[in-house]
Image (spheres, coloured by chain):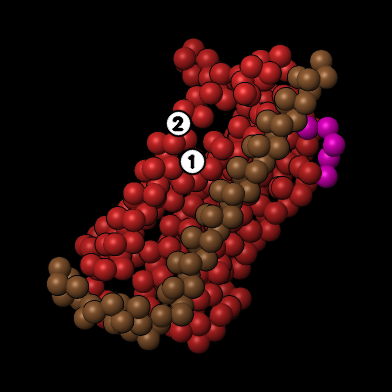
Amino acid sequence: MNRWLHFASPQRFYPLAGRLMPWLVVSAALLALAGLAIGLLIAPSDAQQGEGYRIIFVHVPASWMSMFIYLVMAFWAGVGLVLNTRLSSMMAQALAPTGAMFALLSLLTGALWGKPMWGAWWVWDARLTSELILLFLYLGFIALYSSIEDPSRADRASAVLALVGAVNVPIIYFSVKWWSTLHQGASVSLTRSPSMAVTMLWGMGIMVLAFWAYAIAVALARVRCIILEREARAEWVKYAVE
Amino acid sequence: MPWNSHWVGVADFLAMGGYASYVWISIGACALAVLIESLQLRRRHRAAARRVSQLRGEA
C-alpha cells in the first residue's frame, strides 16, 4: 500500500508516467499492426456480411474503450471526491477527452457499418442512443470542469456528474439484451463460446489490446500536461522541466 | 498474396468485396483521430513546459 501511495503525488508520478509512455506507444503500434494484419489479411470473410464486417476490428475496440474509460474516469473522479487526492482528479480529467474520442469513433464506425448492412446511418435504437448519451456525458464532464474557475471546485462538481452518469454504462452494455434492437447481440460473452471464427477473434482481441495500450499512453501524456499546468508554480516542477 | 488464400491480389484486397469506402473510412478515421490527439498532446506539453520555464525566469 505504501508503495502505491508513494506514486500518488504528482511530483513522483510525473517522471514515472514519462518513463512508461514510450513502452506503451511502441506496444500500441505493434499490436495495432498485428491486429490489422490478422483482421484484414488473414481472417475469413463473414458468411452474411462479406468483407463489410471488417469494420468490427475498429468498431468493437473503440466501443469497449469508450465504456471502460468512462468507468475508470468515474472511479478516479470518485476517489478524488472522497479522499481529496489531487492526482486522482487529474487522472479523471486526463481520461475524458480520450473517452469522448472513442465514443465518437464508435458512433462514426457504427454509422459506416449500419449504412451498408441496415440501410441506415443512424437509428434511434437503445444501443445507439445510449452510446450517444455516453458521448454527451463525456462532453458535459469536460464542459462542466472548464466552466468553473477554481480547479478543486471544478473537480468536485464534475466528479458528481461522472458518478451519476456511470449508470449509463451498464445500460449501453446490456441494451441489446433488454430491448429488441437493430444492433446485433454480443459476439463475445463470458458465459458461452464466441460466435466468431478463431482468427476473427484473435484480430479483435489484439486490436482491443492495442487500443488499451494507446489509451493508457495518451492518458499518461495528458496527465503530465495537467500536472505541469496546475502545479506550474510548485518548486519541484522547476526541476522537472528542461 | 501467396501466404493468404483469401485475397487474390492487392486490388481485390483494397476493394473489400464492394465495401471499400465503409471499411477504409472507418479505419482511416481511427488513424486520423490518433494522429490528431497525439499532435495536440505534444503541443499542449510544450506549451505547459514553456510556461514553467517563464515562471522560473520571473522568480
In the displayed structure image, the side of residue A214 where residue A192 appears, left or right: left
In the displayed structure image, the side of residue A179 where residue A227 appears, left or right: right
Out of B24 and A3, give the one closest to the viewer.
B24
What SS does tag 2 mark?
Answer: helix
In the displayed structure image, the side of residue B3 where residue B59 appears, left or right: right
The magenta stretch spans which residues?
Answer: A147-151
Out of A159 and B54, give the one closest to the viewer.
B54
Report the chain shown in brown: B
- Who's the residue at 76% across and 42% down the image? A145
Residue A77 coordinates in the image, percent (x, y): 64, 36
Report the chain shown in red: A
Residue A20: give its label.
2
* Residue type, label 1: Ile
- Who's the residue at 50% across and 82% down the image? A115
In the displayed structure image, the side of residue A10 where residue B1 appears, left or right: left
Residue holding disc 1: A216
| The N terminus of chain B: image quadrant | bottom left
Asked whether the beta carbons under mark 1 and mark 2 sit within 8 Å of each other, the answer is yes
